[in-house]
Image: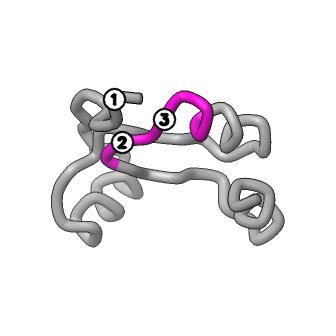
Amino acid sequence: MLPRLLAQEGVDVVIAGGMGVRAQQLFAQNGIRPITGATGNVHDVVQAFLKGSLSTGPNLCEH
């Protein structure tokens, strides 16, 4: 399962435009903080997150 594999690799945050509730639960259960509603250029999103200035909108997943 992806959340477990990512956790084993030291991942502690996943940033996405949208993510279903179950996926968010699986990431959280594996110690990974899901952040949803992020849009834009990947580099810019990561830089904003690292600076503590990432702004997100609504979760873009509707299921």
Up the image or down, 18 lies above or below 10; here it is above
Crowdedness near tag 1: few (<14), some (14–19) or many (≥20) residues, C-alpha within 10 Å: few
Q: Earlier in the sequence, mark 3 or mark 1?
A: 3
Mark linked to residue 30: none
Q: Earlier in the sequence, mark 2 or mark 1?
A: 2
- Spatial CA distance of label 2 from label 1 is 8 Å
Coordinates of residue 13 in the picture (x, y in percent): 57, 51
- Spatial CA distance of label 3 from label 1 is 7 Å
- Horizontal side of 8 relative to 54 (left or right) equals right
Q: Secondary structure at mark 2?
A: loop
- Horizontal side of 24 relative to 15 (left or right) equals right
Answer whether labels 2 and 1 touch (C-beta < 8 Å): yes
Answer whether labels 3 and 1 touch (C-beta < 8 Å): no
Three-letter amino acid code at the position of disc 1: Glu
- Horizontal side of 49 relative to 27 (left or right) equals left
Mark linked to residue 62: 1
Question: In the image, what residue occupies the spot 43% across and 51% down?
Answer: 15
Coordinates of residue 60 in the picture (x, y in percent): 28, 37
Q: Which residues are the magenta region?
A: 17-24
- Spatial CA distance of label 3 from label 2 is 7 Å
Coordinates of residue 5 in the picture (x, y in percent): 77, 66
Coloring basis for residues: one colour
Three-letter amino acid code at the position of disc 2: Gly
Instruction: Say which of marks 2 and 1 sits in front.
Output: 1
Residue 31 in the magenta stretch? The answer is: no
Quadrant placement of the N terminus: bottom right
Q: Which residue was labeled with disc 2?
A: 18
